[in-house]
């Protein structure tokens, strides 16, 4: 049985006091759920979030990390630093990191390896741009992002990966992929995973959808058979909306 996961990517939002307030609102909404629930605050608030939450209720995850263990990389945070405060999961390859910080398939492959070497689970993001979809290249683009950054992994390493399909044209735009578009892409992804790693591995990997998931569309999107959860941006910044999405399962 695949895990259902709903993760809130706070992006570059919320200082310390806002983090404390949002976490206290989130705690009021916690119910037993079929889904694993995660939040990803910014680096400066990770420690505070760990202090405030039982990880069984809501897991605190990081939005990014460097691939090196330490050294002259001003402004970066290493896998070991994340581990030292208890981080067990990191988001890698978000389209905003690819677009604004020049992350490439090659640098992401290194980050994936570094995370796994430190026993950190990876939520690996990918997705096509609008021009790709308009020209019918969405499967080719997504397929190559996954292959280039992940297919050097052996089966056991790959089992530590959660995938997050985030079509760039649906992120923060209010436009979502239709539930059918999400399902079609997730089924395509599962097929290329089955070809590479076998159907048992492909059947067990959680594939999340991200891109303007809101309380009013979550149920329909999560209702699709190959959609195992969501990576939520804007709607994760309000406890009520976030938990309405979690409870859509
Ligand atoms: P929005 O939910 O704001 O579209 O953001 C999606 C996203 O980028 C999650 O990582």
Image (cartoon, grey):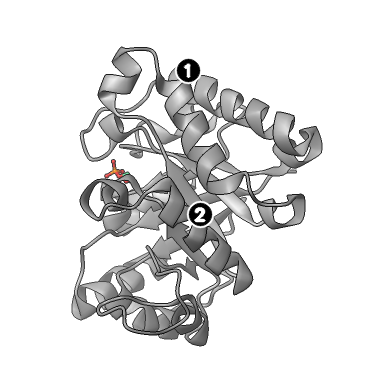
x and y, in percent, of residue 66 in the image: 40, 70
Residue at label 1?
A: 180
Quadrant of image for the C terminus: top right
Find residue 145 and name its label: none
The one of 175 and 136 positioned closer to us in this rendering = 136
For the residue labelled by badge 2, is the local secondary structure a helix, a strand or a loop? helix
Q: What's the distance in space between the residues labelled 1 and 2, CA to CA?
A: 30 Å
Please identify the quarter of the rendering in which residue 19 is found: bottom left
Q: Quadrant of the N terminus?
A: top right
Tell me if residue 248 can be seen.
no
In the image: residue 146, left or right of residue 71: right
The front one of 30 and 65 is 65
Q: Where is 27 relative to 1, above or below?
A: below
Q: Where in the image, quadrant-wise, is ligand 1 located?
A: top left
Task: Identify which residue is drawn at 30% across, 37% down.
Answer: 212
Estimate the x, y position of residue 17 in percent, counting from the top left: 20, 79
The answer to whether residue 72 of the structure is visible from this angle is yes
The picture quadrant where one finds residue 9 is bottom left
Which numbered disc covers residue 109? 2
Q: Mark 1 or 2, which is nearer the eye? A: 2
Which percent across, then down, holds residue 199? 78, 33
Question: Marks 2 and 1: in contact by CB < 8 Å?
Answer: no
Callout 1: SS: helix
């Amino acid at each position: 049985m695949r895990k259902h996961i709903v993760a809130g990517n706070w992006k570059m939002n919320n200082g310390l006091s806002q983090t404390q307030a949002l976490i206290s609102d989130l705690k009021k909404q916690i119910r037993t759920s079929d889904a694993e629930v995660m939040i990803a605050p910014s680096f400066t608030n990770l420690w505070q979030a760990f202090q405030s939450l039982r990880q069984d209720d809501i897991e605190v995850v990081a939005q990014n990390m460097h691939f090196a263990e330490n050294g002259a990389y001003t402004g970066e945070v290493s896998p070991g630093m994340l581990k030292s405060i208890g981080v067990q999961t990191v988001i890698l390859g978000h389209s905003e990191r690819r677009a604004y910080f020049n992350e490439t398939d090659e640098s992401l492959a290194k980050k994936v390896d570094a995370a796994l070497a430190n026993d950190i689970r990876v939520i690996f993001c990918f997705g096509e741009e609008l021009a790709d979809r308009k020209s019918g290249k969405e499967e080719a683009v997504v397929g190559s992002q996954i292959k280039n950054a992940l297919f050097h992994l052996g089966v056991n390493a790959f089992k530590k990966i959660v995938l997050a399909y985030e079509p760039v044209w649906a992120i923060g735009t209010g436009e979502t992929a239709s539930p059918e578009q999400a399902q079609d892409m997730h089924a395509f992804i599962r097929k290329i995973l089955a070809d590479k790693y076998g159907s048992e591995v492909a059947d067990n990997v959680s594939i999340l959808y991200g891109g303007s998931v809101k309380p009013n569309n979550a149920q329909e999107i999560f209702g699709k058979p190959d959609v195992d959860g969501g990576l939520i941006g804007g709607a994760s910044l309000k406890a009520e909306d976030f938990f309405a999405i979690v409870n859509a399962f």
